[in-house]
C-alpha cells in the first residue's frame, strides 16, 4: 500500500524540471509511479485540491491525470491535454496518452501523434517505440522504424539492444513481402554486431534466437535457446539441482520427517551462502529456512542490503516481501515491516510497468500474472497483520480498502480463461479475511463473523479460508454460539445446477452443442490488410461470399497444430465461387508467419492483422474460427479444440456448417 502525499514541493520540483526543457525531465517521475496502487482513484480528489493551489503547474496536472486514470480515462485525458496546453515541452502527458490510445481507448492515429511528440522530446528513450506494433499506418511505421534503427545502431546498452526484436517486427510490418529477403540480409548484419557483445550477454539471447529464426539459422537458434535455459546465477543452478535431487511432498508427512527435511534445506542454504555470499538466492534461502529469530534477522538484513543495490525490481519486490513476512512471523523489527511491505508493492508495480511501456495499463484479469497477483495479496496480508500487531487499526483498515478497490478494478471479463477466473475467489477471500480481522480488532465481533462467513461458505474456503477457520470458531463460541449452530452457519453454499457465481464467465448458447459453434452475429470492424503475397484486403473483399476466417499465430502451439486442417479445408473449397477462406496472423512480426508458411508449404491466404487484434477489448484467445456471411457479419464462431477428437473432426464440422449458409 502506497500512501505518499503529493506535496507542493514535489509538484513544484517537477514543474521546475519541465521549465528547464525536456532533456532534464525525461525520466518517469517516481511520484506518478507511486500512484499505481491507488486502484480506486481515491487520491484524485486530494490531488485536485493541490492543483487548485497551483493551477498553472503542468506537472501537477499530469499527476492529477495519472491519479484518476485508473477510474476515469476521459477525465485523465482532459487533464493530460490541459498539461500539454500549459507546456507542450513537458513529455510525460504524451507518454501517458500513448498508453491510453494503445490500451484503454484504442486509437492508432492518436497513438501515432503522441508517440511522435514524446519521441521528439525524449529522443534517447526507446520507450517511444514500445507501442509501434499498434500503429496501423505503414508509412508511419516505416518512418518510426528508421528512427528506431538509428537509435539502436548508436547504442551499446544491452537492455536497449535487446529491443532489436521490436525493431525487426516493425521493419517487417513496414516492408512489402516481396522485399522480406532483403530485410533478412540486414538482420544478418545486426546479428554479427550482437555476437560481438562481451559476455555476459544473457539479456541479448532472446534477440539472437529470434534473429537466427528469422534468417533460417536453425542450429544457432537452438544454441541460443539452450543458453537461455542456463541460469546466470550459479547459486540458483545449484539450488535447483538440489531441489530436483531432494523432492519433497507435504502429503502424509510426519512432523519428524518435515523437521528432517528442513534441516537438510538449512544445511544446503548455509553452503550456498558460504560459496556465493553475494548471491540473492543464497541469502533468500537462508531467510526462508530460518528457524530462529536471530537467523531471520541476520539473513533478512543481508537480503535487504543486496536488494538495495539490485536494479531489477522483480528481484527486489520478492526479497522485500519475504523479509517482511519472516520478520513478522518471528516478531522481530515489526515496526519496520510496514515500510518494507510498501517498498515491495512499489517494486511490484515497477515490475508490471516494465512489462509494458508505463505504470498505468488497461489490465484485464486474463492478462494479470497470477504469481504476481498472489504476491500482491500476500504483501497486503503481511501489511495488515503487522499494522494490527502494532495497534494501528486505521492503517490496517486502509490496507483492506486497497485490497477491495483492486478487486473491484479487476472484474472477471466474459473471455477470462477458466484457469485464471478460478483464482478470482481467492482475491475476494483475501478481502473478506482482511475486513474480518479489522472488524475484530475494532471490537465489532458480529461484523467480523459476517465477513468470515462469506469466505468460509464460498469458493475460497480452502484458501485463504483455512487461515481463519479456528479464529472464526473461537469467535462463534465467544458470542454464545453452539456447535449445532456453527455447523449450520459454516455450511458451504451449494450452487444449483447450471448456476454460476460469476455471470461474466457464462458463454452464449452454442448454435450446435456438439460442434462447439457459437452464434455471435457481430459486424467485423473495418479491415485494411495485406497478405503475405502482397495482396490488399478490405471488408468489401468479404462481401458476396461466405468467408471462413481463421485466427492464428506462429508462437501458438494449438494454432500451428491446426494449420494442416486449415490447409485441407482450403483445398476442398478453393474452387468454389460462393465460399472463401482467409487466415489472420496475429504475429507481431510477420516475418515469423512468413517463415512458417513457406516451411510447411501452406497456400491459404495469410493476412497480417496484429494491429487489428491489439485493439480488441477484452483480448480474445486463439485459435478460433469465424464464419462470416455474405454481408460481412460474423455469424458463427468456433473457439477451436485442442483435443485429438476436436482436431480430427474440424474439417467436417466446418463443411457441415457451410451447408446451412
Image: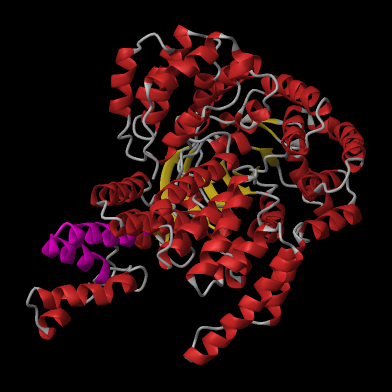
Decide whether residue 486 is among the magenta residues.
no
Q: What's the magenta region?
A: 427-456
Q: Position of residue 531 (x, y in %)?
A: 71, 36
Q: Where is residue 134 in the image (x, y as percent from the top left)?
A: 60, 31
Q: Can residue 394 be seen in this view?
A: yes
Identify the main secondary structure in magenta: helix
Asked if 622 appears above or below 123 in the picture, the reply is below
The answer to whether residue 551 is left or right of residue 34 is right
Looking at this view, is 43 or 571 the one in front? 43
Please identify the residue farthest to the front as the structure is shown: 294
Say which residue appears at 23% left-offset and 57% top-offset.
438
Report the quarter where the N terminus lies.
top left
Q: Residue 469 lies in what quarter of the image?
A: bottom left
Q: Is residue 507 visible?
A: no
The answer to whether residue 62 is left or right of residue 197 is left
Say which residue appears at 52% left-offset and 27% top-offset.
29
Q: Residue 56 lies in what quarter of the image?
A: top left
Please identify the residue farthest to the left as the structure is shown: 480
Say which residue appears at 68% left-offset and 75% top-offset.
268
Q: How is the image coloured?
A: secondary structure
Decide whether residue 432 is among the magenta residues.
yes
Q: Residue 50 lies in what quarter of the image?
A: top left
Asked if 642 appears above or below 624 in the picture, the reply is below
Q: Where is residue 41 in the image (x, y as percent from the top left)?
A: 33, 34
Asked if 531 appears above or below 344 in the picture, the reply is above
Asked if 237 appears above or below 368 in the picture, the reply is below
The answer to whether residue 475 is left or right of residue 52 is left
Say which residue appears at 35% left-offset and 57% top-offset.
386
Q: Position of residue 231 (x, y in %)?
A: 75, 60
Looking at this view, is 485 or 345 the one in front? 345
Looking at this view, is 75 or 299 the one in front? 299
The mark total stands at 0
Amino acid at each position: 500500500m502506497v500512501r505518499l502525499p503529493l506535496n507542493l514541493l514535489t509538484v513544484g520540483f517537477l514543474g521546475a524540471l519541465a521549465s528547464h526543457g525536456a532533456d532534464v525531465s525525461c525520466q518517469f517521475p517516481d511520484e506518478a509511479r507511486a500512484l499505481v496502487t491507488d486502484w480506486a482513484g481515491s487520491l484524485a480528489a486530494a490531488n485536485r485540491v493541490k492543483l487548485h493551489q497551483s493551477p498553472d503547474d503542468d506537472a501537477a496536472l499530469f499527476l492529477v491525470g495519472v491519479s484518476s486514470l485508473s477510474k476515469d480515462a476521459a477525465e485523465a485525458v482532459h487533464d493530460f491535454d490541459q498539461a500539454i496546453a500549459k507546456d507542450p515541452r513537458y513529455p510525460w502527458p504524451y507518454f501517458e496518452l500513448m498508453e491510453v490510445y494503445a490500451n484503454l481507448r484504442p486509437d492508432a492515429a492518436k497513438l501515432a501523434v503522441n508517440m511522435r511528440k514524446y519521441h521528439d522530446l525524449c529522443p534517447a528513450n526507446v520507450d517511444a517505440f514500445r507501442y509501434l506494433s499498434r500503429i496501423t499506418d505503414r508509412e508511419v511505421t516505416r518512418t518510426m522504424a528508421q528512427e528506431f534503427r538509428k537509435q539502436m545502431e548508436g547504442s551499446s546498452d544491452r537492455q536497449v539492444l535487446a529491443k532489436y526484436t521490436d525493431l525487426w517486427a516493425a521493419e517487417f510490418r513496414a516492408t512489402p513481402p516481396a522485399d522480406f529477403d532483403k530485410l533478412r540480409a540486414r538482420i544478418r548484419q545486426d546479428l554479427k554486431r550482437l555476437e560481438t557483445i562481451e559476455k555476459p550477454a544473457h539479456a541479448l539471447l532472446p534477440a539472437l534466437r529470434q534473429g537466427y529464426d528469422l534468417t533460417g539459422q536453425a542450429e544457432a537458434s537452438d544454441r541460443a535457446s539452450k543458453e537461455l535455459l542456463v541460469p546466470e546465477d550459479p547459486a540458483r543452478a545449484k539450488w535447483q539441482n538440489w531441489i530436483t535431487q531432494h523432492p519433497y511432498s507435504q502429503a502424509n508427512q510426519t512432523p519428524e520427517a518435515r523437521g528432517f527435511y528442513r534441516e537438510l534445506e538449512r544445511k544446503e542454504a548455509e553452503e550456498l551462502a558460504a560459496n556465493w555470499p553475494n548471491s540473492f538466492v543464497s541469502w533468500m534461502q537462508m531467510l526462508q529456512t530460518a528457524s530462529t529469530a536471530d537467523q531471520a534477522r541476520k539473513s533478512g538484513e543481508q537480503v535487504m542490503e543486496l536488494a538495495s543495490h539490485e536494479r531489477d525490481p522483480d528481484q527486489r519486490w520478492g526479497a522485500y516481501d519475504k523479509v517482511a513476512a519472516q520478520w513478522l512471523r518471528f516478531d522481530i523489527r515489526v515496526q519496520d515491516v510496514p515500510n518494507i511491505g510498501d517498498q515491495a508493492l512499489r517494486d511490484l508495480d515497477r515490475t508490471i510497468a516494465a512489462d509494458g511501456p508505463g505504470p498505468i495499463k488497461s489490465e484485464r484479469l486474463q492478462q494479470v500474472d497470477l504469481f504476481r497477483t498472489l504476491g500482491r495479496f500476500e504483501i497486503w496480508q503481511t501489511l495488515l497483520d503487522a499494522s494490527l500487531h502494532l495497534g494501528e487499526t486505521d492503517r490496517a483498515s486502509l490496507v483492506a480498502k486497497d485490497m477491495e478497490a483492486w478487486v473491484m478494478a479487476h472484474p472477471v471479463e466474459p473471455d477470462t480463461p477458466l484457469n485464471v477466473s478460478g483464482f478470482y475467489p481467492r482475491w475476494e477471500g483475501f478481502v473478506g479475511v482482511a475486513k474480518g480481522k479489522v472488524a475484530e480488532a475494532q471490537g465489532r465481533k458480529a461484523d467480523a463473523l459476517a465477513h468470515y462467513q462469506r469466505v468460509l461458505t464460498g469458493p475460497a474456503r480452502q484458501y485463504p479460508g483455512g487461515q481463519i477457520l479456528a479464529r472464526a470458531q473461537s469467535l462463534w463460541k465467544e458470542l454464545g454460539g453452539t456447535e449445532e449452530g456453527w455447523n449450520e452457519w459454516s455450511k458451504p453454499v451449494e450452487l444449483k445446477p447450471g448456476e454460476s457465481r460469476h455471470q461474466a464467465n457464462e458463454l452464449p448458447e452454442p448454435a450446435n452443442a456438439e460442434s462447439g459453434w457459437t452464434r455471435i452475429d457481430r459486424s467485423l470492424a473495418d479491415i485494411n490488410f495485406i497478405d503475405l503475397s502482397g495482396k490488399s484486403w478490405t471488408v468489401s473483399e468479404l462481401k458476396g461470399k461466405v468467408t471462413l476466417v481463421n485466427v492464428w499465430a506462429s508462437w501458438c502451439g494449438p494454432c500451428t497444430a491446426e494449420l494442416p486442417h486449415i490447409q485441407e479445408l482450403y483445398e476442398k473449397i478453393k474452387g468454389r465461387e460462393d465460399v472463401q477462406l482467409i487466415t489472420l496472423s496475429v504475429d507481431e512480426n510477420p516475418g515469423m508467419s512468413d517463415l512458417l508458411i513457406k516451411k510447411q508449404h501452406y497456400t491459404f491466404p495469410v493476412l497480417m492483422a496484429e494491429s487489428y487484434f491489439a485493439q480488441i477489448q477484452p483480448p480474445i484467445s486463439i485459435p478460433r474460427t469465424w464464419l462470416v456471411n455474405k454481408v460481412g457479419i460474423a455469424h458463427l464462431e468456433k473457439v477451436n479444440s485442442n483435443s485429438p477428437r476436436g482436431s480430427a473432426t474440424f474439417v467436417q464440422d466446418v463443411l457441415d456448417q457451410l451447408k446451412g449458409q
